[in-house]
Image: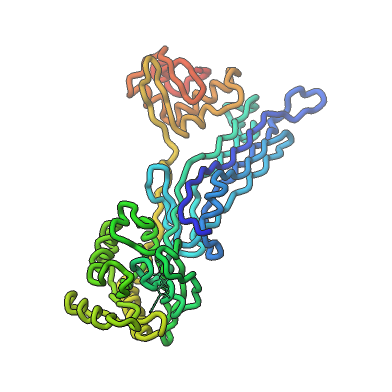
Amino acid sequence: MFVDEAIVRLRAGDGGAGVASFHRERGRPRGRPEGGSGGRGGSIVVLADSEVATLLEYRRHPHRRAGDGTHGRGDLQHGRQGADLVLGVPVGTVVRDAAGVVLADLTEPGARVVLVEGGRGGRGNAALAGPRHVAPTFAEQGEYGEEAEFTFELKLLADAAIIGFPNAGKSTLIARVSAARPKVADYPFTTLEPNLGVVEVDERQFVLADIPGLVAGAAEGRGLGHAFLRHAERARALVLLLDPSPLQEVPVAAQHGVLVEELRRHDPALAARPRLVAVNKADLSGAAEAAAALAAALDGEVHLVSAVTGAGLPALMHAVADLVDRAVREAPERPGYLLHRPAPPGFSVHREGERWVVRGKAAERAVALDDLTVPAAADFAARRLTRAGVDEALRRAGARPGDEVQIGDLVFEFQDEAEQGGKDGEGAV
Ligand SMILES: Nc1nc2c(ncn2[C@@H]2O[C@H](COP(=O)(O)OP(=O)(O)OP(=O)(O)O)[C@@H](O)[C@H]2O)c(=O)[nH]1
Ligand SMILES: [Mg+2]
């Protein structure tokens, strides 16, 4: 089953906690701090993999988690890192965040992007020890891994795409010029998913896509709708394949008009894409006349081919190869992949009712200690908030000494250190 869209929920691993412990020796109740740090949580990465053909796996299992880091231990033993999780997706997958912003367009095999970052491991008391806190009795907590929802959308990377009404003979044609073997039948909408085939013309090669049939009103959902046109979006050239058969109710000139209009409604850039026009089923009576009349009406070239007998196909494939080559010369690079990283760690201050609320990693990290009821730990956290600029930001926002401040789960009273004799004042909590 071919699946070209999936919504996934990804959760990176949590960081392990740091630990507070002390070297113990006979006669010395409290020796040097020896608490190890926690390991960082695993991240989740998407990787464009040419072995992966569909997003089916993500439709089936949309929830993914990377490994957690383990906690630190005494004796300077650090926790192990959580395992990263690598999600293989087909080449041509576009990744969007929940707001629809494109994070990555994975057009090259091997392209990879980190989508959610593992939580940092907490530092143990050995790593926290410094001149001011020679033997901290506290340690940092591990950080939660990031969690977010993403949309994966596969846009096949064909060089050229065949667009036409149901039954026009698109699948018959691709089967004739490539090794692709899609189902062919004389009822409409035989093809429900695109088929790719490699076409060789002299020394040249290009990838041709057989796209499901398009009808008038596809943009409103008629027939199979037009969502599958996403697989034509990256094609450098289009082949409009028209059906002169009397069984086809719409005459070829009108088919041409409908196809161009539906392309435009899906994406104006598609209607502007270089294209060739071909009338199929040359073996049927009336086909040559229909092709000639259309050429006159369009004042352009119309290929007359038969996907069954093969007539006219070499010339048409040559013309497609020429068009693809020209487009490659004009724009050799496929649109590379874009990337917006999430906002860097920082913080913001908001007034919520009577309380000041500080949000953001920099502030949450400062207070992520295992036991803030220990005065030394509270002192340590207060100093880190000052260093991170949180006090200053609160003061500028209008916070007064005694106001309530919330950071994460922690609520405390604002104390203006500047008014108490400077940031380095000893013992202020
Ligand atoms: N006489 C004649 N019949 C053709 C030719 N090409 C295709 N057909 C017939 O047209 C019918 C439809 O062919 P398909 O290749 O399945 O058409 P399609 O465009 O892929 O159709 P959908 O997948 O339904 O959109 C089949 O019965 C084919 O045998 C041709 O050149 N001449
Ligand atoms: Mg078909």
Choose between 138 and 209: the one closer to the eye: 209
| x and y, in percent, of residue 244 in the image | 30, 75
Choose between 353 and 65: the one closer to the eye: 65
Reply above or below: 153 against 417: below
Colour style of the rendered protein structure:
rainbow
| x and y, in percent, of residue 303 in the image | 29, 81
Q: What residue is at 31 percent from the left and 71 percent from the top?
A: 240
Q: Quadrant of residue 167?
A: bottom left
Choose between 47 and 225: the one closer to the eye: 225
Choose between 345 and 342: the one closer to the eye: 342
User: Which residue extends farthest right?
Assistant: 26
Reply above or below: 24 against 248: above
Query: Which corner quadrant of the figure contains ligand 2?
Result: bottom left
| x and y, in percent, of residue 296 in the image | 17, 79
Question: 36 left or right of 384?
Answer: right
Question: 212 left or right of 220?
Answer: right
Reply above or below: 172 against 61: below
Badge count: 0
Q: What residue is at 61 percent from the left and 22 percent from the top?
A: 371
Q: Quadrant of residue 163?
A: bottom left
Q: What residue is at 64 percent from the left and 33 percent from the top?
A: 18
| x and y, in percent, of residue 310 in the image | 40, 84
